[in-house]
Image: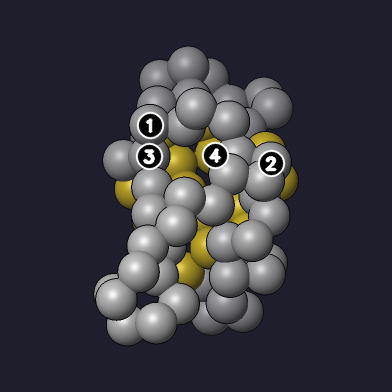
Amino acid sequence: MYRSTDGGATWTTPTTGLDTLGTVALAIGASGRIYAGSVGRLHTSDDNGDTWTPRHEGLPATARIES
């Protein structure tokens, strides 16, 4: 996953708290929380992707993540 804060002129890889996720879905909630998910993994960020918190404990390995 990559992030740009300057309209795409440069890109960074935000990884603080984000393990090797292999992101397949991204969603932004009404509160601004970002959800990044893949099969059996879910992380959230409340600071525009600077840091990530795992939220996948208890999810089955084949969980379907929908926004």
65 to 41, vertically: above or below: below
Do callouts 4 and 2 mark residues in contact (Cβ within 8 Å)? no
Give the CA distance from mark 2 to mark 3: 14 Å
Q: What residue is drawn where x is 48% and y is 17%?
A: 61
The image quadrant that residue 3 belongs to is bottom left
Residue type for callout 2: Gly
Residue type for callout 4: Leu
Give the CA distance from mark 2 to mark 1: 14 Å
Sequence-earlier tag: 1 or 4: 1
Q: Which mark is residue 17?
A: 2
Q: Nearer the viewer, mark 1 or mark 4?
A: 1
Give the CA distance from mark 1 to mark 4: 11 Å
Residue hosting label 4: 42
Q: Which mark is residue 22?
A: 1
Q: Nearer the viewer, mark 3 or mark 4?
A: 3
Give residue 62's position: percent from left, percent from top.
Answer: 40, 20
Sequence-earlier tag: 2 or 1: 2
Residue hosting label 3: 23
Left or right: residue 67 versus residue 24 is: right
